[in-house]
Image (tube, rainbow, N blue to C red):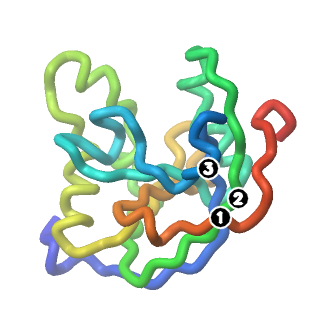
Amino acid sequence: MTPGALPLRHVSAPVWRIVAKTQIRTPASPALAPQGRFHHTGQIATYASLSAEGARVAIRRYLNDGQARMMVPMQLTADRVADFRGDPSASIVWQDICAAGDPSPTWTYSDAARAAGAQAMLYSSRSRPELSHVVVFQPDCLTPAGSPVAFDDC
């Protein structure tokens, strides 16, 4: 992946984000974990999905923490978005790799997108490849676009 060769495109689309109820006033806030599928070493990453169903699928692994959650409809507007949908290597299970002390191979995708100046990056759901997710590197590209609903009611 050569950063200069990475095509970037404009995206203006609705997205859905599931956040802890305590974060409902700042739904575009970056992930609190020090590392994730597409962020490490202090990088900013705000994760969302291109559908409500995608958001439900994406959060499943994290539901055992006992937190009450809300689903927030948002609007993504970004001029420079990298698109890795359809590349299964961008959607592997990364947690076990990091737990073993190795860097996640998924970071090469987000690092290349960041180096190319991307504001966000699209990728396919690991468990449901027909669904798409987005990681936003500049959270000001996200704006609330409707009323949040309790996650249990979605």
Left or right, 2 with reference to 11 = left
Residue holding disc 3: 25
Residue 33, given in percent of the width and then of the height, sits at 36, 33
Q: Nearer the viewer, mark 1 or mark 2?
A: 1
Q: Residue at x 66, y 68 (%)?
A: 14
Residue 72, given in percent of the width and then of the height, sits at 69, 52
Few, some or many residues within 10 Å of mark 2 (<14, 14–19, 20+): many
Q: Residue at x 30, y 80 (%)?
A: 7
Residue holding disc 2: 73
Q: Residue at x 48, y 50 (%)?
A: 47
The type of residue carrying mark 1 is Pro
Left or right, 128 with reference to 39 = right
Query: Up-down: is 78 above or below 75?
Result: below
Query: Up-down: is 22 above or below 130?
Result: above
Residue 76, given in percent of the width and then of the height, sits at 55, 71
Check contact, mark 1 vs mark 2: CB within 8 A: yes
Check contact, mark 3 vs mark 1: CB within 8 A: no
* Residue 78 or residue 57, whichever sits in front: 78
Residue holding disc 1: 144
